[in-house]
């Protein structure tokens, strides 16, 4: 029972808050009734093991719609292949090392474009939707549209082998053999930031979906965290004893999985930068990815291993799959689907992984069933709500929070007013002084004062030299004016020649 005070205005506010709380509870209860879908994992009975189930047995048991989503593209001439899915999971972009690039709707089998670039392709990446994609080619990064028409050649991105895209900031990031991390705003066409890692060629690169911080893996075993507003790493993590081969971050930004050349597979907690768990792979892993529900796919040699160790330690993997006589290059989970896409040296394959996808998605955020009109409206809305690159930090919740520092260390309204320029174009003076002792410190002033009051032989000798110099200057001035010097002055000036 609610207790109210004698104040009528306060009572009205309390009643309104109670009514809003009851409405929220009722709405949440109705929502739970509507969300009937749930992720269904494989369950073994008795002595069975889930990692022994093969794809043919799974296809026989699942529904027809899911069974049709398993396919295999045999493209042995232009491999190995890398792939990327659009944000809503409807379109698939593939890129062969020897120049073959294609974009298509993988569920309907509808081809949008197919190109043979006749040069090396290192990476492919969709931008904010399936209408545009970027390709890291032999020298530069190119942007194409859905029909395969070349739109831009980004000459600033030289020798890039890794690509990623920040959808809320419209930033295309690239890194590669040059050791530079570059941020390019695709909405304005300008290069936002260019950071030199100073750690040699970048081995792998992934973004944190929670705070948009870029994670770069290097040959010395370090994983560095970068933001476009900082020329130095936000943090450094020594993740492996050997070079970092692949890494992935889950959707809520809490865990990072790192695969190293030392055959280790480690789980890290990014919030406090601590290692949680560690596993070993028979050979070094080439690719790692995390699904919406926390399943981890690891590609090593011709094998694909799926783990479920984000919550608890596992003694055995969840699933196994092998593509004979091939080498796994890239694995990516399809958003909102129980499908894992695999790019290998013989083409593209899809693997059914029960329980991998998010069953209940937010259609206002990313809609897998959007129409052309909805896609256009979403693109305009995203441009209007685009975030600035300066807002990328390790903790995004700090933006808009209260500054809890001492009042002496905070900028007041008066200080902010003084920092504002009085006229357009006037430079803002730096009001904050560095906390270092300069030449005018109290100790140095006292030392100089003591040195001035001390009389010694050196001070007397300097004083006599200054007097002689003063007499010579006066003599020279008198000669130039035609004035005869006085006798005592002449004797004093020429006395050293006696």
Image (spheres, rainbow, N blue to C red):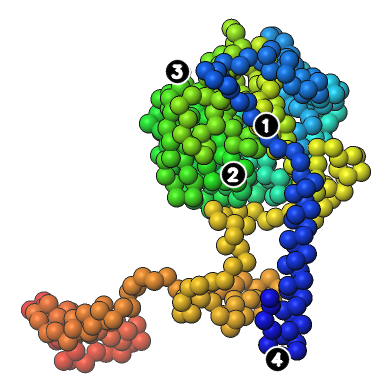
Depth-wise, is mark 2 or mark 4 nearer the camera?
Answer: 4
Query: Is the C-beta separation of discs 3 and 4 under 8 Å?
Result: no
CB of mark 2 within 8 Å of CB of mark 1? no
- Taking the view exactly as shown, the residue that stands out farthest to the top is 325
* Crowd band around label 1 with a 10 angstrom C-alpha radius: few (<14), some (14–19), many (20+): few
Q: Quadrant of residue 375?
A: top right
- Residue at 67%, 27% (x, y): give it: 354
- Foreground mark, 3 or 1? 1
Q: Which residue is mark 2?
A: 208
Nearest to the observer: residue 83 or residue 434: 83
Residue shown at 74%/21% (left/top)?
62
Query: Which residue corresponds to the image point at 78% horizontal and 58% vertical from the top-left?
Result: 27
The disc, 3 or 4, on the residue closer to the chain's N-terminal end is 4
> In the rendered view of the protein, which quadrant contains the C terminus?
bottom left
Tell me, yes or no, if residue 120 can be seen here: no
Quote the CA–CA distance across marks 2 and 1. Answer: 26 Å
Provide the secondary structure element on which disc 3 rests.
loop
Q: Please indicate whether residue 302 sits to the left or right of residue 459 in the image.
A: right
Q: Disc 2 on helix, strand or loop? A: loop
Tell me the distance, in whole angstroms, between the alpha carbons under discs 3 and 1: 29 Å
Residue 53, horizontal then vertical, whole percent: 61, 16
Q: Which mark is residue 282?
A: 3
Q: CA distance from mark 2 to mark 4?
A: 51 Å
Q: How far apart in space, not on screen, are marks 3 and 2 (Cα)?
A: 28 Å
Which residue position is annotated with label 4?
6
Q: Quadrant of the N terminus?
A: bottom right
Instruction: State the image coordinates of residue 320 (x, y, percent, origin top left).
Output: 57, 19
The disc, 3 or 2, on the residue closer to the chain's N-terminal end is 2
């Amino acid at each position: 029972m609610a207790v109210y005070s004698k104040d009528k205005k306060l009572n009205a506010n309390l009643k309104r808050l109670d009514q809003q709380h009851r409405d929220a509870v009722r709405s949440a209860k109705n929502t739970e009734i509507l969300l009937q879908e749930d992720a269904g994992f494989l369950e073994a009975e008795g002595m069975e093991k889930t990692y022994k189930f093969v794809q043919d047995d799974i296809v026989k048991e699942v529904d027809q719609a899911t069974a049709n989503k398993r396919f295999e593209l045999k493209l042995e001439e232009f491999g190995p292949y890398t792939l990327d899915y659009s944000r809503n999971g409807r379109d698939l972009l593939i890129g062969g090392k020897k120049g073959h690039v294609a974009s298509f709707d993988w569920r309907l089998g509808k081809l949008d474009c197919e190109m043979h670039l006749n040069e090396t392709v290192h990476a492919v990446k969709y931008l904010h939707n399936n209408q545009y994609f970027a390709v890291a080619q032999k020298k530069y990064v190119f942007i194409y549209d859905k029909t395969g028409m070349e739109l831009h050649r980004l000459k600033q991105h030289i020798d890039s082998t890794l690509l990623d895209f920040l959808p809320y900031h419209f930033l295309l990031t690239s890194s590669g053999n040059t050791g530079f991390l570059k941020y390019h705003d695709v909405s304005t066409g300008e290069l936002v930031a260019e950071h030199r890692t100073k750690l040699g060629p970048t081995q792998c690169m992934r973004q944190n979906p929670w705070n948009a911080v870029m994670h770069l893996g290097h040959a010395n075993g370090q994983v560095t965290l970068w933001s476009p507003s900082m020329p130095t790493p936000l943090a450094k993590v020594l993740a492996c004893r050997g070079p970092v081969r692949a890494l992935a971050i889950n959707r809520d930004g809490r865990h990072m999985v790192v695969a190293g050349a030392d055959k280790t597979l480690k789980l890290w907690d990014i919030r406090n930068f601590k290692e949680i768990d560690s596993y070993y792979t028979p050979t070094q892993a080439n690719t790692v990815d995390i699904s919406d529900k926390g399943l981890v796919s690891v590609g090593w040699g011709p094998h694909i291993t799926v783990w479920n160790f984000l919550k608890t330690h596992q003694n055995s993997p969840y699933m196994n799959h092998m593509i004979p006589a091939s080498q796994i290059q890239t694995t990516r989970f399809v958003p909102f689907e129980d499908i894992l896409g695999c790019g290998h040296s013989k083409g593209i394959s899809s693997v059914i992984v029960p329980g991998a996808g998010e069953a209940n998605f937010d259609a206002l955020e990313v809609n897998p069933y959007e129409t052309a009109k909805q896609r256009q409206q979403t693109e305009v809305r995203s441009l209007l709500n685009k975030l600035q690159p300066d807002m990328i930090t390790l903790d995004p919740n700090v933006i808009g929070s209260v500054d809890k520092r001492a009042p002496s260390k905070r900028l007041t309204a008066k200080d902010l007013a003084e920092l504002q320029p009085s006229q357009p174009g006037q430079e803002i003076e730096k009001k904050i002084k560095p906390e270092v002792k300069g030449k005018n410190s109290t100790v140095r002033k006292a030392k100089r004062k003591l040195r001035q009051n001390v009389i010694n032989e050196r001070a007397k000798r300097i004083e006599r030299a200054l007097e002689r110099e003063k007499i010579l200057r006066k003599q020279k001035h008198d000669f130039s004016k035609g004035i005869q010097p006085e006798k005592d002055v002449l004797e004093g000036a020429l006395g050293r020649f006696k």
